[in-house]
Image (cartoon, rainbow, N blue to C red):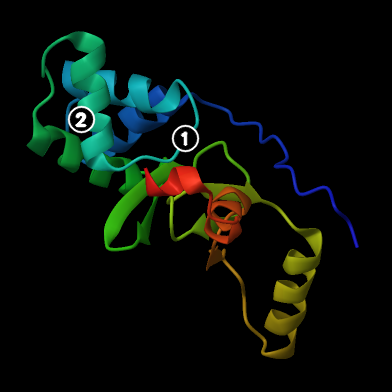
Amino acid sequence: MSTDYALDPVTVSSSPQERFAEYLQSRGKRITQQRRALVDHVFERHDHFDADELIANLARLTGDSKVSRPTVYRTLNELVEAGLLRRMNLGGRAVYEHDYGYPQHDHLHCTICDKLIEFQCDELQQLREAVAREHQFRVTGHRLIVTGVCGECGAKRHRRQSPLDLV
């Protein structure tokens, strides 16, 4: 069994900004300065976030709230519809991650600290394809989120109590 679960790179033909502009144009919408700022901010690094974290980050970076809360929520929905972001429901909250230009992958989700660990597994892909073949099913994608407790949280829960814990 392979133990390299790192994500493989994906080559894309246009930038997220270009792809989003095409999507908006196909819907008769404009690429506003606020939408452009949101796309730039979301795609400058890869992480998982929710709308409130995005709003707080934007306010902290710009020093004010140039992008309104409704614009953030509307733009996040548009980015999902455009295939640029993926929305996951974790513990009752919507969490977003890059979808465009990012390989198919799965997640381990710690239910204590909310950490998400991404991984790819060839054996899982092979199993998915074998089950689909058996049922004459055409796979268009999948999403697997394994819930549990990460190593750090598990170590905190199972360590011996110290006299300092009582302080």
Compared with 24, 89 (above or below) is: below
Q: CA distance from mark 2 to mark 1?
A: 15 Å
Q: Secondary structure at mark 1?
A: loop
Residue at the far front in the pictured view: 163
Which residue shows up at 76% across the image and 75% down it? 127
Tell me, for residue 132, which label it has, or none: none
Decide which of 40, 161 is in the foreground and name it: 161
Q: Amino acid at mark 1?
A: Asp
Q: Secondary structure at mark 2?
A: helix
Question: Could you tell me which residue is drawn at 63 percent across and 52 percent down?
Answer: 151
Q: Amino acid at mark 2?
A: Ile
Name the side, left or right, on which 86 lies relative to 60.
right
Q: Nearer the viewer, residue 120 or 37?
A: 120
Q: Mark number for residue 55?
A: 2
Q: Which residue is mark 1?
A: 47
In the displayed orientation, state which residue is furthest to the bottom: 135
Q: Is residue 98 left or right of residue 82?
A: right
x%, y% of residue 69?
A: 10, 34
Q: Residues within 10 Å of mark 1 (few under 14, many from 20)?
A: few
Q: Where does residue 84 sit, x and y in percent of width and height?
A: 42, 40
Q: Position of residue 162 (x, y in %)?
A: 53, 49
Instruction: Give residue 131's quadrant in the image.
Output: bottom right
Q: Earlier in the sequence, mark 2 or mark 1?
A: 1
| Residue at 83% across, 47% down | 4
Residue 153 placement (x, y as % from top left): 53, 53
Q: Is residue 28 in sight in this rendering? A: no
Q: Quadrant location of residue 133? A: bottom right
Left or right of 20, for residue 59: left
Vertical arrangement, residue 160 with respect to residue 40, above or below: below
